[in-house]
Amino acid sequence: MLRRLGSFALIVFAGLAWAQTPRRQLSAAQAQEFEAALQSNPNDRTARSALLDYYFINPRLDPAEAIPARRRHILWLIENTPADKLAGSPAATIDAAGHRLADPQGFRLASNAWRAQTARPGIDTAALVNAAYFFKLSDKGFTISLLERALTQEPANKEIGARLGDEYALAIMGVTMLNQNGFPLGADPSQTQSVLAKQAREALNTLRNPYVLAKAGYMLSFQGAILRGAGKLAFDTAPLAESTLQRAVGLAPGDPDVANYLEQHHAIQREIQAAAGARRAR
């Protein structure tokens, strides 16, 4: 993969190395103390946050212990504090399959709990965003609908717009797995030809929210380059990224964030072209 991606791969893997710097982990004794604290005060956010990380990022912990503990804490968050940022964090996600912490039963229970929350009238925007994060790979169509609802409630919210752009890009590329830092690890070719993928492409041609477009264009460029370089994506996302980002800049010509996404896309393309030129010169 390094040979195929050339110098662009160095950027990607340097970013991975930085992003994956180990965080300080609890000891087993500290985890037990936090669990005891939650027994007397379930609203102890510090304890629950620490435990979520402990069960999520501790590679030495037996999955037989981590999985039911994660399920218990995540369900509590969804049912009691769905708008809390903890409920929308990577540590509060459950996958049905694919890795050592996969939990099909927990995924089903958490999915049902989130769907019940999002069906409530007057649900908080933050809860919609958190629910969308939970479903971002398993049900991209539902995620898009949740983020569209959230953006309707807060139309000027750049973060929600960016998340919706992310999801359009994931749908177009058929991404099936991300690591803990958001780097794509797999894609399903059949999803790239789905009705949802076609609808996402059409949305990028018709939407007038520059933040949705800017983030979608950037993710198509960045994640698309990673997937294509790894042989996991059959088409080049760069042309769609370019046209989407140009539309975003046209809609918000003075916005530095939007302009920065376009420049990052161009930097990625320069790296890819330089790597290709170096290979041809050998």
Image: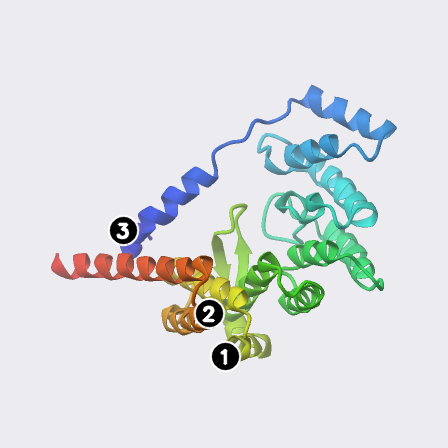
At 65% across and 55% down in the image, what residue appears?
Answer: 133
Q: Earlier in the sequence, mark 3 or mark 2?
A: 3
Q: Earlier in the sequence, mark 3 or mark 1?
A: 3
Marks 1 and 2: which is nearer the front? 2
Outermost residue, right direction? 40
How crowded is the residue under tag 1: few (<14 C-alpha within 10 Å), some, or many (20+)? some
Q: Earlier in the sequence, mark 1 or mark 2?
A: 1
The residue where tag 1 is placed is 205
In front here: 154 or 105? 154
* Residue 247 relative to residue 76: left or right: left
- Residue 222 visible at all: no
Q: Given the image, on which type of amino acid does mark 3 rest?
A: Ser
At 67% across and 49% down in the image, what residue appears?
Answer: 88
Q: Position of residue 38 (x, y in %)?
A: 81, 30
Number of disc labels = 3
At 78% across and 61% down in the image, what residue appears?
Answer: 118
- Residue 110 visible at all: yes
* Residue 221 relative to residue 137: left or right: left
Q: Given the image, on which type of amino acid does mark 2 rest?
A: Ala
As measured in the structure, the alpha-carbon distance from the residue carrying label 3 to the one carrying label 2 is: 28 Å
In front here: 195 or 65? 195
The residue where tag 2 is placed is 248
Q: Given the image, on which type of amino acid does mark 1 rest?
A: Asn
The residue where tag 3 is placed is 7
Q: Position of residue 216 (x, y in %)?
A: 49, 65
Q: Quadrant of residue 18?
A: top left
Element type where label 3 sits in the image: helix
At 44% across and 72% down in the image, what residue appears?
Answer: 244
Element type where label 2 sits in the image: helix
Q: Is residue 54 above or below residue 12?
A: above
